[in-house]
Image (cartoon, rainbow, N blue to C red):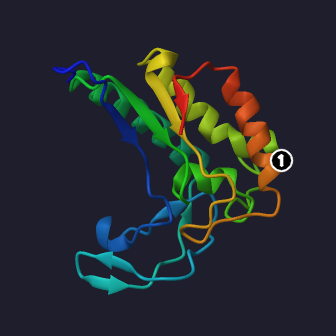
Amino acid sequence: MEPTGTPIFLQLWHCGRASHSDFHNGELPVSASAVKLNGDQIHTPLGKKEYETPRPLTVDDIKATVSDYRTAAANAKDAGFSGVEVHSANGYLINQFLDSKTNLRTDAYGGSLENKYRFLKEVLAAVLEVWPAERVGIRLSPNGVFNDMGSPDFRETFLYTIKQLNKLDLGYVH
């Protein structure tokens, strides 16, 4: 994938609640919690529609999603990409776990900063089984409001997140 010497990284992401059942054979989109995305409508294969209240991921769903990220990272490697970027921004699934506006969980994936970070931590651990840290980047949007996001505790959340990410020595933060 680097015929000119320029690395090409594949972005790995999951829409979470920023999706619609029309894309999922009638199944509701998923999220950290059952918090509907308010605002504009979504363009589906069947036309423009209102966002739906997502189904909260179960712990088993979370484990399966982490495994899916690992598989996607391996597929990117097999396809010849130079590395991957884990999209954890813009109101998509990982951001939905980090943000207290969309993460109302009371289990190991919600409440404390450590718990809200846990899903991202597990996703990165899975991706790092496939790629060396210098070939993994991450995208964040502290206090981003796209896709109806933004929480009053964003400073604490993202300072904690960055401190944890610094321990991993990733290739970059976007």
Does residue 108 appear in the picture of this structure?
no
In the image, is residue 43 above or below residue 165?
Answer: below
Residue shown at 21%/26% (left/top)? 79
In the image, is residue 16 above or below residue 132?
Answer: below
For label 1, count other residues whose C-alpha is less than 10 Å away and answer few (under 14), some (14-19) or many (20+): few
In the image, is residue 106 above or below residue 72?
Answer: below
Q: Depth check: give the residue in front, 87 or 6.
A: 6
Q: Depth check: give the residue in front, 116 or 131.
A: 131
Does residue 97 appear in the picture of this structure?
yes
Q: Is 4 on the left or on the right of 124, as rendered?
A: left
Residue type of the residue flagged with mark 1: Glu
Q: Depth check: give the residue in front, 124 or 29.
A: 124
How far across and down, in percent of the image, does residue 107 sit? 75, 49
Q: Which residue is mark 1?
A: 156
Quadrant of the rendered structure where residue 21 is? bottom left
Q: Quadrant of the N terminus?
A: top left
Residue shown at 43%/20% (left/top)? 135
Quadrant of the rendered structure where residue 108 is? top right
Identify the element where label 1 is drawn.
helix
In the image, is residue 51 above or below residue 155?
Answer: below
Instruction: Residue at the far left: name it.
Output: 3
Q: Is 47 on the left or on the right of 112, as rendered?
A: left
Q: Is 85 on the left or on the right of 75, as rendered?
A: right
How far across and down, in percent of the image, does residue 53 sit? 54, 76
Residue shown at 38%/68% (left/top)? 27
Callout count = 1
Instruction: Residue at the far top: name it.
Output: 132
How far across and down, in percent of the image, does residue 133 sit? 51, 18
Residue shown at 70%/41% (left/top)? 117
Q: Is 168 on the left or on the right of 4, as rendered?
A: right
